[in-house]
Structure formats: structure tokens, C-alpha cells
Image: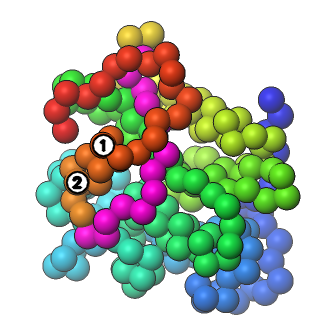
Amino acid sequence: MIVKKISNYFAIIYVEDILMKYNDIKTPEQLLKYMDENIKYGFVDDNSKIYGPWNNQEFQQGCQTKWHLSSSERLIKAGYGHCFDQVELERDWFINHNYKFKTFYIMFELPFSNSYSMHTYLVFEKDGKYYYFEHSDFKNRGIYEFETNQDAINYQRNKHIEYNKQRNVINEEILNCLHIYEYTNPTYGCTMNEFISNILENGKEVGNENNMGRMVDL
């Protein structure tokens, strides 16, 4: 499989150098640029406290107790959001510009407290090609072209595994607990547990026919 990266954080050609307004964005490349310039990884709680970066204990605890899913409007105003929030901004833009797209959630469903990461992302279709749009994962930030939707899912899955290998044990048993779900509009304002529970209950599992592991408790 050949992956064609058509846009990234470091080098994109733009018509204008001025900071774009959200409603002026015309292309996915411009959306990525807008998010680069205006959206930071983290979140803002109801008391306007900023949590971030992701790799500290306060952020991780805050996600469980202080975070609520942001609408696109709230995210633009706050300027901070993690992947769950940022996908909702992307969803809003792609809906309003009549693109066909799907959003996905990937996680290791393990029955114990762990440091394996979870992630959400978007894949859109254009002219018979499929594009993995990534902003919140800064190491993979960009827009990647694929021949099929499944190729895009497989590519991101491999990146997710590679990242977790740096922090955790990855063996066959663990890989059997890695699941990917397609999900649609979640409820804005929901908690972390509510967000995940809704996907596990109502999402459509994709690309994991042989995986049997399941999380017991959220």
C-alpha cells in the first residue's frame, strides 16, 4: 500500500497568509491550517481552567472528572480540545461542505486500569479517493490519501500500535483487544464515560472481525 501525504503541519500552500476565520475555510487543507493556528491540544473546564499537555497526571485526571465534549462553537471559543473535541469541529466543517465522511474511535478494551491510549479521527471521501484527516495527533498531523476507506483505517491502526509500543507491552493478547468503531454524532456536553459508553453501545465495529477482547468496566 502506497500512502500519499498531501498536506502536513509544516508545509502547505495557501492563497493568503492572514489568519483565516472558520467560516471562510473552503478546503480540508485550509481547515488543517486553521486548526494549526487556532486549536491547541488540551481542554478548558467549566471554570475556564486549562488542562494540558496530555502527558501529565492533572490532565489525565481532569479528563475523567472535568472534561465535557465540546461542540464546534465551544471549541473555537475555547481554543483547546483533545481528539474527541477536535473531531467534532471537523465533523461540523465536512457536513457543512457536503463531504462524505466517517468518524472512528480506536481503543484497547482491557479489563484493568492501563496507560494504553485511545483516539478518534475522521476519514473523508473525494473524487473516488479516501483521506485520513489528522490534527490532534501531532506526530501524524496531516491529510493522507488512500485507495479505500479500509486502507485509511489500517494505516491509522498501525500508527496507533506503533505509538503504544513506545509506552506499553504489545503482544497478541493485547492486539486482540484493540477495537475500532465507526460512530456518529455524540451528545455535546457528555462526560468521558458517557462518550465512550455511547460508542461501545451504538457504534459499528469495523476491521476487527478476529478480535475477541472486550473491556469489562469503564
Q: Quadrant of the N terminus?
A: top right
- Kindly identify which residue carries mark 1: 201
**Badge 2 element:** helix
Return the x and y of residue 52 as percentages of the image width and height: 32, 60
* Whether label 2 touches label 1, CB < 8 Å: no
Q: Residues within 10 Å of mark 2 (few under 14, many from 20)?
A: some
| Amino acid type at mark 2 | Glu
Q: Which residues are magenta?
A: 176-189
**Badge 1 element:** helix
The way the protein has been coloured in the rendering is rainbow
- Residue 73 placement: quadrant: bottom left
Q: Which mark is residue 110?
A: none
Q: Name the residue located 18 percent from the left edge and 76 percent from the top edge.
A: 46
Query: Is residue 217 toward the left or the right of residue 101 in the image?
Result: left
Q: CA distance from mark 2 to mark 1?
A: 10 Å
Residue 60 visible in the picture = no
Q: Which mark is residue 194?
A: 2
